[in-house]
């Protein structure tokens, strides 16, 4: 039966159908992830460049009260994490918020969300790889007294002093390209191997942050927290306005939690482990962020953070009077950013896999290698694009677009919670028929999602006009792609589904 344009735009794919397709013989990625590696994926995608850079950006705005900023950001991320947890329980498939949107608000909205996720994961991978280059160079300088030549560690396209764009011919940022190649090789080898490597790197990263906190607390001075709230005419923004501004800065240190939801199809017990993994990762991340923030502020006056390069390493050197603690921290930062880049590229490939499996983009993105059970062609394409951007573009241009993509996806996730509750109740889904009670957002389907939407919109309105312009162009490309390819090739046009292709 022919569908009208409106029916095609708002057609949905039931959670049961997505799960059945994911379990079909030959159609799925391998289910190799348990709760621990799944939680480590979320922690690995979240604790990275944010904690090593964000203090330098946030403390000058709020002063010692930046601790409250971290709490505000954690609460905002927590509201969205609760929504993710319920949806991950109801729609245990790969694709994260794309799959959630497809099961609730319709195909067109899901495709738009998918485009937002491409911004979030693809550009975040490039930006974190660029951060890795900076820390690698710092480590080499401290360890060997040698630096990578300027022309091989700086991008061609950079932000000018007047806010414009400058082109530096002959320059390329080589280290992030090499990092992306390493991540690509690991991901092609298979999810289980990649997850194990990531878990090891995450544990090292957490140990480094504990190491920093212990040494920083040895130089703790309670006077550094006075006055806790900077006055209105003080060095920063002052008062709660400074706390709020800093919260917008540190919020983006929490955006990796949704990576767990992209792994639903590769999780052994997705209805149990994905919700638990999301909430466990949020708790771990929040505890470590608060620990590091308090330790750093106790060891160094807030006025010293502004413009400080490699801030945490400098704090250790000042506290101990020795260089080796800073060297250890730089090495930990190199490992930290490596794991973030690995996980963000992984998330990008799994989202593209989910979109391609639904027929909305070419089938090459869902081609799975039968031996490694990983989407090899997909991974190669993503890695090439991420590597080119990381090697040629200044990270200044990337973070705002990452933020926009993330916040729009978060808003759709919050909207999806009341929609899917009503939809599954009206349709009499298997969970409702059997009375199975998985994770549910507390206080009903409207309060927490509503607060999440309000918090995300508040941060969206604070983004720059340039970000809005670039995002509008990206949305025009997205709409053209959907009407030119996606709508005509959607698998919802067909009553039956074909399995994912295997390459030999």
Image (cartoon, helix red, strand yellow):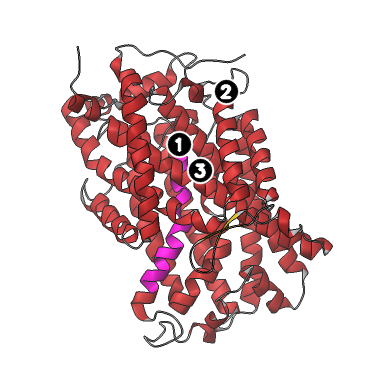
Magenta segment boundaries in residue numbering: 243-260
Point out residue 399 in the picture as x, y percentages from the top left corner. 48, 55
> Residue at (41%, 12%) from the top-left corner?
498
Point out residue 129 in the picture as x, y percentages from the top left corner. 61, 50
In 3D space, how far apart are the residues under numbered discs 2 and 1 (Cα atoms)?
16 Å
> Residue at (63%, 54%) from the top-left corner?
155
Q: Main secondary structure of the magenta part?
A: helix
Answer with mark 3 or mark 1, whichever residue precedes in sequence: 3
Q: Is residue 96 magenta?
A: no
Point out residue 233 in the picture as x, y percentages from the top left corner. 39, 88
Q: Mark 2: which secondary structure?
A: loop
From where the camera sits, is residue 438 visible? Answer: no
In the figure, residue 244 lies in which quadrant?
bottom left
- Can you tell which of label 2 and label 3 is closer to the viewer? 3
Which residue position is annotated with label 2? 373
> Residue at (59%, 17%) from the top-left corner?
370
Q: Mark 3: which secondary structure?
A: helix
In 3D space, how far apart are the residues under numbered discs 2 and 3 (Cα atoms)?
22 Å
> Residue at (78%, 63%) from the top-left corner?
141
Which residue position is annotated with label 1? 262
Q: Is residue 248 magenta?
A: yes
From where the camera sits, is residue 145 visible? Answer: yes
Which residue position is annotated with label 3? 122
The quarter of the picture where the N terminus appears is top left
Q: Mark 1: which secondary structure?
A: helix
Of residue 84 and residue 7, the one placed in the foreground of this image is: 7
- Can you tell which of label 3 and label 1 is closer to the viewer? 3
In 3D space, how far apart are the residues under numbered discs 3 and 1 (Cα atoms)?
14 Å
Point out residue 51 in the picture as x, y percentages from the top left corner. 55, 61
Of residue 121 and residue 199, the one placed in the foreground of this image is: 121
């Amino acid at each position: 039966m022919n569908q009208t344009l409106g029916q095609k735009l708002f057609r949905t794919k039931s959670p049961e159908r997505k799960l059945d397709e994911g379990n079909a013989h030959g159609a799925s990625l391998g289910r190799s992830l348990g709760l621990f590696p799944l939680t480590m994926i979320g922690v690995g995608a979240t604790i990275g460049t944010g904690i090593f850079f964000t203090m330098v950006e946030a403390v000058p705005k709020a002063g010692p009260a930046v601790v409250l900023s971290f709490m505000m950001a954690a609460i905002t991320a927590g509201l969205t994490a609760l929504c993710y947890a319920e949806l991950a329980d109801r729609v245990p498939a790969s694709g994260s918020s794309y799959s959630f949107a497809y099961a609730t608000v319709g195909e067109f909205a899901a495709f738009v969300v998918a485009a937002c996720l491409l911004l979030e994961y693809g550009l975040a991978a490039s930006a974190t790889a660029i951060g890795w280059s900076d820390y690698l160079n710092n480590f080499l300088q401290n360890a060997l007294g040698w630096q990578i030549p300027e022309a091989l560690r700086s991008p061609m396209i950079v932000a000018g002093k007047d806010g414009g764009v400058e082109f530096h011919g002959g320059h390329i940022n080589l280290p992030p390209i090499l990092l992306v190649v390493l991540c690509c090789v690991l991901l092609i080898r298979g999810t289980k191997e990649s997850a194990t490597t990531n878990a090891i790197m995450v544990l090292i990263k957490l140990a480094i942050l504990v190491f920093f906190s212990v040494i920083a607390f040895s130089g703790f001075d309670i006077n550094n927290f006075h006055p806790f709230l900077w006055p209105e005419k003080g060095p920063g923004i002052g008062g709660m306005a400074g706390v709020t501004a800093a919260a917008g800065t540190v919020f983006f240190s929490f955006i990796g939690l949704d990576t767990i939801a992209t792994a639903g199809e590769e999780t052994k017990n997705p209805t149990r482990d994905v919700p638990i993994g999301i909430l466990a990762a949020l708790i771990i991340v929040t505890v470590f962020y608060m620990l590091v923030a308090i330790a750093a502020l106790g060891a160094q006056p807030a006025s010293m953070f502004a413009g400080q390069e490699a801030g945490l390493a400098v704090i250790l050197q000042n506290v101990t009077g020795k260089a080796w603690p800073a060297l250890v921290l730089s090495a930990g930062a190199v490992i930290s950013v490596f794991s973030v880049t690995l996980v963000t590229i992984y998330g990008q490939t799994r989202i593209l896999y989910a979109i391609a499996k639904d027929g909305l983009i070419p089938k090459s993105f869902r081609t799975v290698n039968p031996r490694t059970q990983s989407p090899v062609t997909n991974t190669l394409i993503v890695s090439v694009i991420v590597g080119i951007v990381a090697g040629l573009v200044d990270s200044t241009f990337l973070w705002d677009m990452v933020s926009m993509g993330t916040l729009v996806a978060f808003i759709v996730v919050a909207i999806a919670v009341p929609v899917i509750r009503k939809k599954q109740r009206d349709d009499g889904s298997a969970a409702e028929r059997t009375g199975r009670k998985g994770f549910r957002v507390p206080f009903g389907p409207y309060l927490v999602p509503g607060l999440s939407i309000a918090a995300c919109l508040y941060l969206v309105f604070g983004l720059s006009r340039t970000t809005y312009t670039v995002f509008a162009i990206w949305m025009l490309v997205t709409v053209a792609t959907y009407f030119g390819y996606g709508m005509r090739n959607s698998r919802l046009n067909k009553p039956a589904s074909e399995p994912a292709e295997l390459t030999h």
